[in-house]
Image: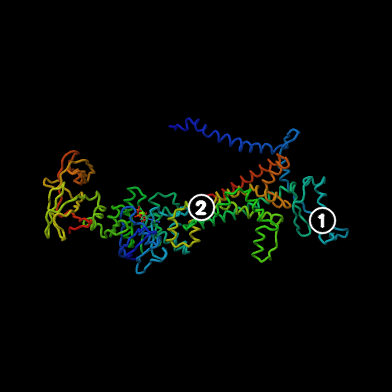
C-alpha cells in the first residue's frame, strides 16, 4: 500500500515551494541563461540586437596554437644574432597577422616560448589573459587543495585530544573562517605591504635586517604565492572542523584494539585513522577544490589580477569581462567552461577515491 | 599461559573512586568471570588488566611480572570487545593478521597463524570477506580469532556476547567453553549475565560498586553466598528475602518467626546471635515445596507455566511477595491459597550488616 505521503504530496510541494522557487530563480535560471548567452554576442547594454554566434566565444577563449620557428640566417647560412648576442627569429607578427599561409594563427598572440636546440617553439593563444587565468587557477588549486587539506588534518589531529583548554585552540583556529574574506583580504594587504608591512618587518627583525623588503603583492613572482598562503590560512579552520567530525566517528575501541596489537602512532594513523576518514577526505578534497576554483574575492581586493596578469583567475576574468567590459556573453562562456572543468574534476576525484571492491 | 594477580588495585577518576581496593588471584589456565550490576566497575577493572586504563594504586601482575606500567602490547594479553572492534576496511584475513602485519612478520608465518585461527573457529570460508558482509556472530568470531592469533597468556573478554541474539549467544557460549578447554589459556570474562557466569566460569568474582563481594566457584556462590548482595545477584529467579525475629537461639539451632511466617527452627553454626535480633531469611524459589505445615501461606497472584517448572507469585498476609518455583505439572490457579515450606538446611540467614551467619 502506498503511504499517504507518496499518494498525495501536494503538502510537501507546498512546503518545498518557496525554497524551490527561489533556488530556481537565482540558481537554475541564471545557470541556464549563462549557457544560452555563451552562444551569442550579447553585451550588458547595447543598442544592437543579439546574434547567435555558435561556438565562436569558446574558440576565442580556448584557441591555442603551436608554432616552431627556425633562426634567421644570412646568405652564408650563418645564424643571425641580435645586438645582445641572442639568436634572432623571424617576427611572430608575420604569422599571426593576415598571413594567408597560416590562417589558424590569425589574431593569436605569444603566450610563452621554449627553445629546442636552434629552433624556438612558440605557444600562441587567442586570449592570452584567459590562458594565464586558467594556469593561475590550476596552480592555485593544485597547491591549496593538498596543503590546506593536509594542514587542516594535522590541526584536527592535534586538537582531537582531551587536554585542558583545547577549546581555546579550536576557537583560535576557527576564527579566520567567521571573518569575511573581504575583510581578511584587506587586512592581509597591510601585512604584505612592501614598505611597512607586518611580514617584511617580521622577516627583517628575525634576520636582523638581512632579508630584503619585498612588495609581496606588487611582484609578479610573489603575488600569487602570497594570495595562496593567505587563502590557505583563512579557510583551514573550516576544513579542520570537517576532519574533526570525521575523526570523532571512528570508534575508540578500534584505537584500543590497535594499541593492544602494539601499533605505533604512525601505524595507528595508517591502519585505523586514515581508512576511517576516507569519506571525509573525499568531501574535504571536493569542497576545497570547488572553493579554490571559485577564487575571486582575494584577487579583487588585493591585486585585481595584477601585476602583469600574474594573479588573473578564471572567476575574476568572468566578472571582469561580464561587468567590467560589459561583455556578458564572454563572461558567461567563462562560467560555463569553469562549470565543465569543475564537474569533470569532481567526477574524476570521486572515481579516484571510490571504494575499491 | 599466565596467572593474573591483583593486589589492592584501585582506580579513581579525579575524586570519584571507581575501584576501591580489589584483591583477586586468577590461576594459570583458569576461566574467571567478573559479574556485577551495571556500573560496578567490571569493564574498568578488565581494561586496567589490559593496560587501556592506568592503575591508580596497588599492583597488577601477569605471570610473574608486575605490569602496572607496561603498555598493552607487552602484557601478553588479547582483548575481545563488546563492539567487536574489528577494522571495517580490512578483510577478515587482514583483521586476523593485523598484529603480525604491524610487527612485519613474514608472509608464511602470517598465513600459517591465520589458517590455524580460522580452523579453530571454523571460518576458513569467511577469510576474504569484509566485516560488513558478516553477521554479528561471525564478526565476534573474527574478534576472537584476532585474539587467538596473538597467542596471549591471558584472554580478556568484555561482554563479548551481549550484542548477539539469544540463540546465538548460547551457541557462542558453548564455543567459548570449548575454546577454553582446547587452548587451556587463562581467560578473564566480564558479563552481567549470570547464566554466562555460571556456565563458563571456574571462578566467579562478584563485584559491586568497585569492591569484591565474593570470589568462588559457581556452585559455591549459589549455595553459600557470603552476603545478601551475592545471594540476590546469583540465581534466577532471585532468592526470596524475608525479615524475621530471633525467638530463641542455642549453639546449634535458632528459632525464628516473622509477621508472615510461622515460627520455625533452623540449624546454626555461628555464634553471637541473641533473642530479639532482627535477621533476614533467604530462601531460593526452587527450595520451596507445597507442604501443609509449611512456614508460608499466601494467595497465588500470578502463575507462569514454563513446562519444566511453574513459577508462582505468592502474596503473603503482610503484602510481601514470594517467588516460588514448583514442578512443571503442579496444578495451580490464580486466587487459590497455597502453603509452602522449605527444608531447614536450605535456608540462609543474614545479619543486619547483610553477612551470612548460618553455616
Ligand atoms: N572516564 C570516566 N570518568 C569518570 N567516571 C567514569 C569514567 N569511566 C567510567 N566511569 C565510571 O566508572 C564506573 C564503572 O564503569 P564500568 O564501565 O567499569 O562499569 P561496568 O561494570 O562495566 O558496567 P556495564 O555493565 O554497564 O558495562 C561507572 O560508574 C562509570 O560512571
Ligand atoms: Mg562494561
Q: Residue farthest to the front?
A: A196
The mark found on residue A244 in the picture is 2
B332 up-or-down from B19: above or below: above
Q: Residues within 10 Å of mark 1 (few under 14, many from 20)?
A: some
Badge 2 or badge 1: first in the primary sequence: 1
Q: Position of residue B175 (x, y in %)?
A: 33, 55
In the displayed structure, does residue A46 sit left or right of residue A81?
A: left
Based on the displayed image, in which of its 4 quarters is residue A337 positioned? Answer: top right
Q: Secondary structure at mark 1?
A: loop
In the displayed structure, does residue B72 sit left or right of residue B336?
A: right
> Label 1 lies in what chain?
A
Q: Please report the residue visible at 70 percent of the width from the left and 44 percent of the height from the top.
A: A320
In the image, A315 versus A272, the foreground residue is A315
B286 up-or-down from A268: above or below: above
Residue at mark 2 to residue at mark 1: CA–CA distance: 58 Å
In the displayed structure, does residue B57 sit left or right of residue A135?
A: left
Q: Position of residue B106 (x, y in %)?
A: 47, 64
Q: Mark 2, mark 1: which one is toward the viewer?
A: 2
The residue that mark 1 highlights is A89
Residue at mark 2 shares a chain with residue at mark 1: yes
In the displayed structure, does residue A151 sit left or right of residue B249?
A: right
The mark found on residue B173 in the picture is none
In the image, B106 versus A7, the foreground residue is A7
Question: Looking at the rendering, in which quadrant would you find the C terminus of chain B?
Answer: bottom left
Q: Position of residue B22 (x, y in %)?
A: 31, 62
- Ligand 2 found in image quarter: bottom left
Q: How many marks?
A: 2
For label 1, being within 8 Å of ligand 1 is answered: no
Q: Residues within 10 Å of mark 2 (few under 14, many from 20)?
A: many
Q: Secondary structure at mark 2?
A: helix
Amino acid at each position: 500500500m502506498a503511504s499517504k505521503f507518496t499518494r498525495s504530496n501536494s503538502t510537501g510541494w507546498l512546503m518545498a515551494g518557496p525554497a524551490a522557487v527561489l533556488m530556481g530563480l537565482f540558481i537554475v535560471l541564471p545557470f541556464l541563461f549563462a549557457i544560452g548567452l555563451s552562444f551569442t554576442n550579447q553585451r550588458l547594454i547595447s543598442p544592437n540586437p543579439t546574434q547567435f554566434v555558435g561556438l565562436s566565444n569558446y574558440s576565442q577563449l580556448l584557441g591555442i596554437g603551436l608554432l616552431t620557428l627556425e633562426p634567421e640566417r644570412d646568405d652564408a647560412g650563418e645564424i643571425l644574432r641580435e645586438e645582445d648576442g641572442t639568436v634572432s627569429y623571424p617576427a611572430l607578427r608575420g604569422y599571426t597577422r593576415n598571413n594567408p599561409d597560416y590562417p589558424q594563427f590569425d589574431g593569436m598572440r605569444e603566450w610563452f616560448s621554449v627553445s629546442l636546440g636552434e629552433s624556438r617553439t612558440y605557444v600562441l593563444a587567442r586570449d592570452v589573459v584567459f590562458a594565464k587565468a586558467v594556469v593561475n587557477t590550476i596552480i592555485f588549486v593544485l597547491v591549496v587543495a593538498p596543503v590546506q587539506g593536509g594542514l587542516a588534518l594535522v590541526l584536527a589531529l592535534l586538537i582531537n585530544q582531551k587536554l585542558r583548554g583545547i577549546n581555546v585552540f579550536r576557537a583560535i583556529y576557527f576564527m579566520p573562517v567567521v571573518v569575511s574574506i573581504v575583510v581578511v583580504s584587506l587586512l592581509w594587504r597591510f601585512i604584505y605591504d612592501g614598505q611597512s608591512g607586518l611580514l617584511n618587518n617580521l622577516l627583517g627583525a628575525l634576520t636582523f635586517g638581512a632579508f630584503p623588503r619585498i612588495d609581496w603583492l606588487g611582484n609578479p613572482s610573489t603575488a600569487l604565492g602570497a594570495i595562496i598562503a593567505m587563502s590557505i590560512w583563512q579557510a583551514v579552520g573550516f576544513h579542520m572542523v570537517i576532519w574533526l567530525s570525521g575523526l570523532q566517528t571512528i570508534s575508540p575501541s578500534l584505537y584500543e584494539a590497535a594499541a593492544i596489537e602494539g601499533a605505533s602512532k604512525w601505524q595507528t594513523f595508517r591502519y585505523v585513522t586514515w581508512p576511517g576518514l576516507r569519506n571525509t577526505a573525499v568531501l574535504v578534497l571536493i569542497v576545497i577544490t570547488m572553493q579554490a576554483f571559485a577564487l575571486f574575492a582575494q584577487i579583487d581586493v588585493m591585486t585585481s589580477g595584477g601585476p602583469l596578469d600574474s594573479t588573473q583567475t578564471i572567476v575574476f576574468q568572468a566578472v571582469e569581462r561580464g561587468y567590467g567590459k560589459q561583455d556578458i556573453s564572454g563572461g558567461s562562456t567563462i562560467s560555463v567552461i569553469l562549470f565543465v572543468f569543475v564537474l569533470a574534476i569532481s567526477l574524476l576525484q570521486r572515481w579516484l577515491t571510490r571504494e575499491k571492491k | 599461559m599466565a596467572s593474573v594477580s591483583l593486589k589492592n588495585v584501585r582506580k579513581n577518576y579525579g575524586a570519584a573512586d571507581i575501584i576501591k581496593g580489589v584483591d583477586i588471584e586468577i590461576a594459570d589456565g583458569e576461566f574467571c568471570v567478573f559479574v556485577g550490576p551495571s556500573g560496578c566497575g567490571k569493564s574498568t577493572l578488565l581494561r586496567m588488566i589490559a593496560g587501556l586504563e592506568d592503575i591508580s594504586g596497588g599492583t597488577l601482575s601477569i605471570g610473574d611480572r608486575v605490569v602496572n606500567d607496561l603498555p598493552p602490547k607487552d602484557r601478553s594479553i588479547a582483548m575481545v570487545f563488546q563492539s567487536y572492534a574489528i577494522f571495517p576496511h580490512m578483510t577478515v584475513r587482514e583483521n586476523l593478521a593485523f598484529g603480525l602485519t604491524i610487527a612485519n612478520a613474514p608472509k608464511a608465518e602470517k598465513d600459517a597463524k591465520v589458517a590455524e585461527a580460522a580452523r579453530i573457529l571454523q571460518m576458513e570460508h569467511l577469510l576474504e570477506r569484509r566485516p560488513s558482509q558478516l553477521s554479528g556472530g561471525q564478526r565476534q568470531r573474527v574478534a576472537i580469532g584476532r585474539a587467538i592469533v596473538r597467542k596471549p597468556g591471558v584472554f580478556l573478554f568484555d561482554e563479548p556476547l551481549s550484542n548477539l541474539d539469544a540463540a546465538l549467544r548460547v551457541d557462542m557460549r558453548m564455543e567459548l567453553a570449548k575454546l577454553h578447554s582446547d587452548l587451556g589459556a587463562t581467560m578473564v570474562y566480564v558479563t552481567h549475565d549470570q547464566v554466562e557466569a555460571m556456565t563458563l566460569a571456574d571462578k566467579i568474582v562478584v563485584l559491586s560498586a568497585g569492591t569484591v563481594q565474593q570470589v568462588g566457584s559457581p556452585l559455591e556462590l549459589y549455595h553459600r553466598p557470603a552476603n545478601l548482595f551475592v545471594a540476590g545477584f546469583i540465581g534466577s529467579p532471585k532468592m526470596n528475602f524475608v525479615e524475621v525475629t530471633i525467638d530463641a537461639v542455642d549453639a546449634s539451632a535458632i528459632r525464628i518467626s516473622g509477621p508472615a511466617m510461622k515460627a520455625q527452627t533452623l540449624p546454626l553454626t555461628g555464634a553471637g546471635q541473641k533473642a530479639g535480633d532482627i535477621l533476614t531469611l533467604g530462601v531460593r524459589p526452587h527450595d520451596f515445596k507445597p507442604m501443609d505445615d509449611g512456614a508460608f501461606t499466601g494467595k497465588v497472584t500470578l502463575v507462569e507455566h514454563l513446562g519444566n517448572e511453574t513459577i508462582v507469585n505468592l502474596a503473603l498476609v503482610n503484602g510481601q511477595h514470594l517467588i516460588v518455583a514448583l514442578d512443571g505439572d503442579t496444578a495451580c490457579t490464580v486466587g487459590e491459597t497455597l502453603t509452602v515450606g522449605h527444608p531447614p538446611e536450605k535456608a540462609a540467614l543474614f545479619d543486619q550488616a547483610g553477612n551470612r551467619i548460618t553455616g
